[in-house]
Amino acid sequence: MKLPIYMDYQATTPVDPRVLEVMVPWFTEKFGNPASRSHPFGWEAEQAVERARAEIATLIGADPREIVFTSGATESNNIAILGIARFHKSRGNHIITTVIEHKAVLDTCRHLESEGFEVTYLPVGTDGRLDPKRLADAINERTILVSVMAANNEIGVIQPLEEIGAICRKRQVHFHTDAAQGVGKMPLDVQALNLDLVSISGHKIYGPKGIGALYVRRRPRVRLQAVMFGGGHERGMRSGTLPTPLIVGLGAACAICSREMAAETARITALRQRMQEGIMKQLTHVAINGSTEYRLAGNLNISFAYVEGESLMMAIKDIAVSSGSACTSASLEPSYVLRALGVNEELAHTSIRFGLGRFTTEEEVDYAVRTVVDAVNRLREMSPLWEMVQEGIDLDSVRWAQH
Amino acid sequence: MAYNDKVLEHYEKPRNVGSMDKNDLQVGTGMVGAPACGDVMKLQIRVNENGIIDDAKFKTFGCGSAIASSSLVTEWIKGKTIDQALSIKNKDIAEELALPPVKIHCSVLAEDAIRSAVEDYRKKQQKGGVDANRV
Amino acid sequence: MIYLDHNATTAVRPSVLAAMLPLLEEQSGNPASVHGFGRTARQRLDHARRSLGTFFGVHDSLVSFTSGATEANNLAVFGIAGMRDRPGHAITSAVEHPSVLEAFGRLQQLGHEVTLLAVDGSGRVDLETLARQVRPDTFLVSIMQANNETGVLQPVTEIGHWCRERGILFHMDAVQGVGRIPWTGERLPADLVSVSAHKLGGPQGVGALIMERSLSLQPMLFGGGQERGRRAGTQNLPGIVGMGAAMQWLAEHEREEIAAMARLRDRMEEELLAGVPGLVIFAREAVRIPNTSLVGVEGIHGETLVMNLDLAGFAISSGAACASGKGEGSHVLAAMGVTEALALSAVRISIGWNTRMLELERFIQQFIHIVARLRGGTGARGS
């Protein structure tokens, strides 16, 4: 077993060697610009791009013509939200999303507020799920877009997309889902779920970084305002030279997901169970954050009471994990997602996200369990809070000398 | 998050972790910080009849720098008189461990812990003295 | 098949691919993560950023990576426009790349006023024309360094100097210039410079916007706060490392490479002129980047020539890649006042880092041969 162990699959995944293999020739031998219509370098690249488009479409039950290539899920989210809002401004100015979305959705919505849009940020339950009834109540005649993520990046909780989709369709509101964490890891069918727009990321599904896609429904046709202009690529929705090697990689990654998702989900779920049981059997006062029923196979987010998160990270430095979402973990703020679940600040500080994935082994899981259990025990032995709890003192009754 | 070697050394092999009987008249207990702020330090000193700190123990909930600061302090104050212990300043701790600016508060907390433990010891001595006279 | 369409895209240099592959093969982290994988990723990102900063002579913090030059151009235009609280006036030229022209079109929709500068017969903008169009509320001038179709260089140093004296922000699309004319190492002529990796032997899907000084551009993409808040989204690390390697290669070798391309191009132009009576080299008298020749033979449709050359094993373009296949004439040649008949005959030959003399010789022979055949055959004339 090689150390350190990578357990941060929700931040980014390695490129699958099978994906890399099909990408490499497109860097050096077959390097044409797919927009070059006058020679085989261009034609060959265009064919490869179209093949990839079909592979992506297949994974989500879409038509290839509904797939728009972008530089990643952040751009997909931006195009979907800015694009729908700006195009349909005359129809309405109200957008609904949730408080636990990725920053790419939240920051984009916040920006739209400065353009005169109203945004409703719906709360979620303690299990991290949105109550569809709340959504139905929040929709009004000015609502043009609902954006709810498929699965959360920090806690892996899967949202009730089918119910949300049915509500949106009935009320004739566009439904966008940020599926950066969901695509390829859970069944996601744009027809069954009534999805109008879906954001897809390459580097979360063992494809390359710098590439993503946006599904844009054709029937009924979803129209949006582009964010980037010039050249009119991707039916005017996203201009810029199509990066063939990256697109080929994304297509190959999706094709593998289509073939292997069911078996992979079963395998990773078993690993997560093993990890969860291993930890819970040996440690008390640990809590799993978010629903365990509606959850991505590869996500285990646990709070370890009475140990401090940063020192725990230090103690398990052989295991690369995240103490929040990768985008915010450089700051010491407790996770806004956990806070939204009602996890108190102290406990939010002690949460660790274990991200398991395609290349995680049972041996790695067992090593991680041992390391974590030892570290928590050691730190608790050192923790005055743990001592007080053992003595039966209620920590909430203590008056702390704030400083 | 790159830690200095000295911090890592103390963090991995902390000195004097543990607890003493907080009801013992010779023992002073200091508890500073708050869980919501992310660090709580408990420092205990045992002072012998010659006024020398002959033992010190700590428990800390906090980051690596907080643990290292408290561990270092227990090493430093052992064998010192109370006044000598009180002369230890957070600056000394921060310098010894080369703490970055964002971690200076850990050394402040450690200095506070010494004060708090000494205060507790002195309070007990006063009270204890009164009690002893009554007997 | 011999590739002579390097202004559309270039093959990745071996040294660039070698720098990129480890990042695609190993587990490479997200530069935003704090663990070892993330920190290593961050270091590689910083290293690539430094390569660009060094090349352009600016502080690393002034380099923002994007998904390519289209995004960099858009970010420059919308980023500057977004710094204003009311509409104003912006100037560009009629021969810019669509990613600048269409961004300006969008500016108009957003309520700004836009002036498209006319160009002279060789496609150049001149300072006097620019000066006449500037207004008190002009907030941006965007002019490309070198034209993608003709290779003509614009007087960007003069324009930059002039704009700077008047406090007008100047953006330069340097996509076709970098690696084709030696970078002087002097102060950047523009406040903002767009670069693309895949035009200089780097990978597709990455570019950069370089700033001469820090400007608080309004971002186009939101969320995550990467690139100092100027461009959200997980960085395309292998791509960025590839771009860094390509820039580093240029820093060390660009003079020889540029000289070699110039020798090839000059030889080709001489032989084509000698071998094809009536051949026109567009903007031949203008200062051009040394890898680009836009040529035409009146009476032979460019598409026909391109197709015939394709069958003979040569890949060239009948116009810019972005616009080719749309069936429209070149907006660049139209702006230069070239007649439609002559414009339709135009084909672009663009040499690159891996073009060899032997290949070019074969191309020249075939070109001459095919033109002769098309002229002799029925229906070759009259487009």
Image: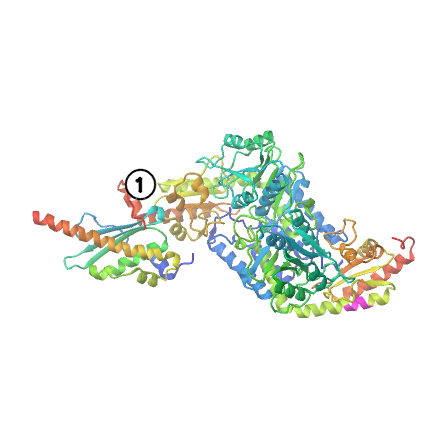
Instruction: From the image, tell me which residue sits under label 1.
Output: A396
Relative to C40, is A282 above or below? above
Left-right relation of C131 to B107: right
Dot 1 crowding, Cα within 10 Å, few <14, some 14–19, many 20+ = few
The structure residue drawn at horizontal position 70% and vertical position 60%, both measured from the top left corner, is: C132
Indicate the chain on which mark 1 is placed: A
The N terminus of chain C: image quadrant = bottom right
The three-letter amino acid code for the residue at tag 1 is Asp
The picture places residue A284, in percent across and down from the top left corner, at 35, 41
The structure residue drawn at horizontal position 83% and vertical position 61%, both measured from the top left corner, is: C367
Segment colored magenta: C266-270
The structure residue drawn at horizontal position 43% and vertical position 53%, both measured from the top left corner, is: A318
Q: Is residue C182 visible?
A: yes
Q: Nearer the viewer, residue C333 or C237?
A: C333
Q: Nearer the viewer, residue A222 or C166?
A: C166
Secondary structure that dominates the magenta span: helix
The picture places residue C270, in percent across and down from the top left corner, at 81, 68
Left-right relation of A385 to A228: left
The structure residue drawn at horizontal position 82% and vertical position 67%, both measured from the top left corner, is: C271
